[in-house]
Image (spheres, coloured by chain):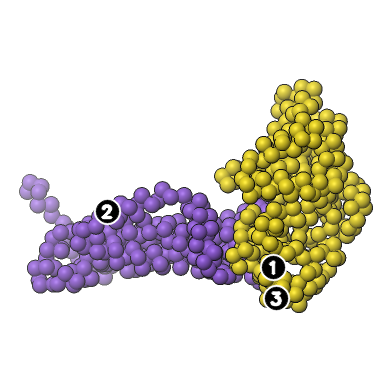
Chain colours: A yellow, B purple
Amino acid sequence: MKRRTVLTTVAVAAAIGLSACGGGSDPLASEAPTDTGTAAAGGSIVVGGADFSESTLLAEIYAGALRAKGVDATTKTNIGSREVYLRALEDNSVQVFPEYTGALAVYYDKEFTGTDPDEVYAHVQEVVPDTLAVLEKSAAEDVDSLAVTEETARTRGLTTIEDLAGPAGDLTIAAQPEFKERQQGAIGLEEVYGVTFGTIRPLTGQAVVQALVNGQADVANVFSTDPAIAANNLVVLEDTKKVFGSQNIIPLVRADKVDQVQDTLNAVSAKLTTEAITQMLKQTDIDKQDPKAVAEEFLTSNGLA
Amino acid sequence: MIASLLDWFLDPANWSGEDGIPARLFEHLWYSALAVGLGLVVALPLGLWVGHSGRGRWVVSVANSARAVPTLGLLFAVALWVGPAFRGDLAYLVPSTLVLVLLALPPLLAGTYAGVEAVDPAARDAAQGVGMTGWQVLRQVELPCALPLLLSGVRTAVLQVVATTTIAALIGLGGLGRYLIDGIALGDYPRAAGGALLVALLAVVLEGMLALLQRKVVSPGLSGRAVGRSRNDDDAGTGKETAQEPVDLRAPA
């Protein structure tokens, strides 16, 4: 917790600094990045991770694969939400970040409504700023989803998000604080499905699933790879109109680091599957194993390290 | 940064609805008042009893050592532990109130106890001498005399609780902390800064109001203001000096 606060503070300070000296028009675009010395042959790489366990795991996998190829790679995880960590990439405090095609595409193009995996991937390559680049997409997909308990699904007759349109007004949803104001969240659900929840309970991390399991929320916004779904017999409501889109895992890297990392990370993406990630997350979240150790095991067994 | 912060405060959308500043401010005050109120219910009788009887001083020591407990860590622990036992809002309100009460208790208890104990023994003696019962001594002499210290305990507690109530937003409640948490989650820094500023302003305003209240309710004889005022009143009446020049009896004639 303390570490996250510190990192967030750093990101906040960095963002304030940036906006103070003239705004978001990429000041680093053509100039060499403000590298703090030691930029030997490509230099060291910091792989960032957002504030959820899958992002931490992916960061460890990327960093482990890079280290196996002789790159001086470290991780900086728990940075925060997309709004925060993209600034960390732009100010060069991290160089590689595990991302998701759909969420990233919508972040840069609020109007984008594509849902086909290839269409979304093609679009995301177009809309990222010139300072950043996306590498090849993996088959692994982690899409936001709405989950309910088995009992709620039965008593309310819920199988898809469409079924929520009627009862949603009486229901409480537990979701991350940013859910309320995102297109791939409350806004999209209301526009596309006409689903407006009675109460949105902003929570983070495992507290989201806990609220659902303890009966303090009726619906929870969880990731499709979350091992808690299987562990608690939760029912994931089908996103028939694809509000949450396609969310293939992609490495987002700084444009000036592409040559250094792309072969290695593309090889990793080729081996990643949704099942593999769910399995690894069960090890880190439920069996409480060290993400770094789990990542290394994956890399070794797939001949990547 | 300053400009966008100003924009945030001037945006009418931020002043209405359940996310609006008035609603969040009300929530914040409600959580804080609940915590300080419950703290007083516990600390006032306990502190008066310890001060009056001189027994159970260890209670104050224990409460003071509780100041070392990290509020944030305790909040998550309590939310995990007692949260599941409650439904709806209570699952979050109970843990956050519990933690805030624990934060309010040490200054409240210390202020009450120290106030009563610091009462001039001569005043207590005189009260007993004119035949007051223990209860009357406590109510009519010790409590009024203890007010300055007691109220400064209340002020400390209010200040700490109002500033810390922001953490309620971490476990899904409202209050001004919502702006901080949501602002950081969305990268909306004017909102986060606005929330922080509002909390600080609220704390300062409440502190000022309590300071005024303290002037009103503390007996002038205790605060030393009575002496100054009566002299001035004498002078103010006629506009010229009516009293004799003070004579320093220690000085040689």
Find residue A155 and name its label.
3
Q: Is circle 2 on the same chain as circle 3?
A: no
Q: Secondary structure at mark 1?
A: helix
**Picture residue at 21% right of the left edge, 68% below the top:** B138
Cα separation between marks 2 and 3: 55 Å
Residue A8 picture quarter: top right
- In the rendered view, does A287 fall on the left or right side of B63? right
Are circles 1 and 3 on residues that touch, CB within 8 Å?
A: no
Q: Is circle 1 on the same chain as circle 3?
A: yes
Marked residue nearer the N-terminal end (1 or 3): 1
Q: Residues within 10 Å of mark 2 (few under 14, many from 20)?
A: few
| Camera-side residue of A209 and A175 | A209
- In the rendered view, does A265 fall on the left or right side of B19? right
| Camera-side residue of B237 and A172 | A172
Are circles 2 and 3 on residues that touch, CB within 8 Å?
A: no
- What amino acid type is highlighted by mark number 1? Glu
Cα separation between marks 1 and 2: 51 Å
Residue topped by disc 2: B58
Q: Position of residue B189 (x, y in %)?
A: 67, 52
Are circles 1 and 2 on residues that touch, CB within 8 Å?
A: no
Q: Position of residue A107 (x, y in %)?
A: 81, 53
Pointer 1 indicates a residue of which chain? Answer: A
Residue topped by disc 1: A150
Pointer 3 indicates a residue of which chain? Answer: A
**Picture residue at 50% right of the left edge, 69% below the top:** B30
Q: Secondary structure at mark 3?
A: helix
Q: Quadrant of the C terminus of chain A?
A: top right
